[in-house]
Image (cartoon, helix red, strand yellow):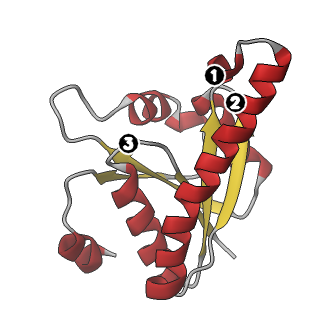
Amino acid sequence: MRKFLVVLDDSRECLNAIRFAAMRASRTGGGVEVLAVIPPEEFNHWIGVGDIMREEARERIEAHFEVFAKWMRDKQGVDPELIIREGEPVAEIMAQVRDDPEIGVLVLGAASDKKGPGPLVTQLTRNAGGLPIPITIVPGDLGKDRLEAIT
């Protein structure tokens, strides 16, 4: 089964990327894999404190994921899979794409402010030639109705 890989983070545009991935998966019989990356700089503390912070980060990610997962299951009939990796976000996204041959499309949300599309979109589009799959970039300010119409 072809899977849509979408990145879960705290950005506003993440919501549209997740919606798009779930709608496309639902309409094409695919799956959704949600990847959250915990950056290494969050744990540069004493070992015990770093372990506690790492566990708290995982709990936050799992709670955040469950909100989206419930919507995907209830509204789109898609049961997403959560993957949590630790490291530099771009390197971990590229590694996940290489590690899972069922991933067919990487879906990213683009910020709509004047600062640009966001660091992930900027960095990953620079590396797009090295990916074995296409990238779909979803505008962060695209409305739900428009998303439904194009998926």
Amino acid type, mark 3: Ser
Position above or below: 83 against 93: below
Q: Position of residue 69 (x, y in %)?
A: 55, 71
- Is residue 134 depicted above or below 22 in this figure? above
Q: CA distance from mark 1 to mark 3?
A: 17 Å
- Mark 2–mark 1 CB contact (< 8 Å): yes
Alpha-carbon distance for marks 2 and 1?
Answer: 8 Å
Q: Amino acid at mark 2?
A: Met
Residue at position x 57%, y 81% in the image: 78
Q: Is residue 28 left or right of residue 118?
A: right
Q: Secondary structure at mark 1?
A: helix
Q: Which residue is mark 2?
A: 53
Q: Residues within 10 Å of mark 1 (few under 14, many from 20)?
A: few
Residue occupied by mark 3: 11
The residue shown at (39%, 67%) is: 20
Task: Tally the numbered discs.
Answer: 3
* Circle 1 or circle 3, nearest the eye: 1
Q: Earlier in the sequence, mark 2 or mark 3?
A: 3
Give the residue pinned by disc 1: 42
| Nearer the camera: disc 2 or disc 1 | 2
Real-space CA distance between mark 2 and mark 3, rounded to the nearest whole angstrom:
20 Å
Residue at image location 19% in from the left, 65% down from the top: 143
55, above or below 35, in the image: above
